[in-house]
Image (cartoon, rainbow, N blue to C red):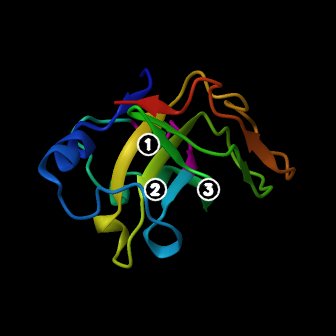
Amino acid sequence: MANALYPKFKEAILQHTANSSMGGAGATGVYAALVDTGVYTYSAAHEFYSSVVAGQLGTEIEIGTKTFVNGLFDAADVTFAGFVSVNAEALVIFIKNAGANTTWRLVAYFDTGVTGLPVLPNGSPIDVAWNASGIFQL
């Protein structure tokens, strides 16, 4: 699978649906999670994080220092706490809210072009560097 924005996220933006803003922080922030593609397979039909959670490796991390310029979304690189597990081959970006993960909107799926992936965790922190030209553009 190549990198993709989830189509349901695009629909939510166009319809200004609840939980589609990427401007929040903390409980309503934008998060990233490492994913084992042997457990989770991207699907254009997936809308919420509950579709991904079985393939999540370690703990999700909030994406900080977000910028939005001319439709380009960018942010600070992220570092995941060290853990030991199977290969982390992909990364999913999603929007959290105060509800259950059945309401956390999926934003993007990356399995190529992200420095630091794939990686076989060995207990050391995992640094993920976004593309120098930004994370994605609408």
Main SS class of the magenta portion in the image: loop
Q: Position of residue 87 (x, y in %)?
A: 67, 38
Which comes before the other along the chain, label 2 or label 3? 2
Q: Position of residue 19 (x, y in %)?
A: 29, 63
| Relative horizontal placement of residue 79, taking residue 105 as reference (left or right) | right
Name the kind of residue labelled 2 in the image.
Ala
* Furthest residue toward bottom: 98
Q: Nearer the viewer, mark 3 or mark 1?
A: 3
Name the kind of residue labelled 3 in the image.
Gly
Q: Nearer the viewer, mark 2 or mark 3?
A: 3
Q: Which mark is residue 54?
A: 2
Which comes before the other along the chain, label 3 or label 1? 1
Name the quadrant containing residue 61.
Answer: bottom right
Q: Residue at x 67, y 30 (%)?
A: 118
Asked whether disc 3 touches disc 1, contact meaning CB atoms under 8 Å apart, the reply is no
Q: Which mark is residue 40?
A: 1
| Relative horizontal placement of residue 64, taking residue 6 as reference (left or right) | right
Q: Which residue is mark 3?
A: 64
Vertical side of 136 occupied by 2: above or below:
above
The segment highlighted magenta reads 33-41
Label 1 Cα crowd, 10 Å radius (few <14 / some 14-19 / many 20+): some
**Please, what secondary structure does the residue beneath circle 3 have?**
loop
Q: Where the C terminus falls, by quadrant?
A: top left
| Relative horizontal placement of residue 103, taking residue 72 as reference (left or right) | left
In the image, 40 versus 34, the foreground residue is 34
Label 3 Cα crowd, 10 Å radius (few <14 / some 14-19 / many 20+): some
Asked whether disc 1 touches disc 2, contact meaning CB atoms under 8 Å apart, the reply is yes
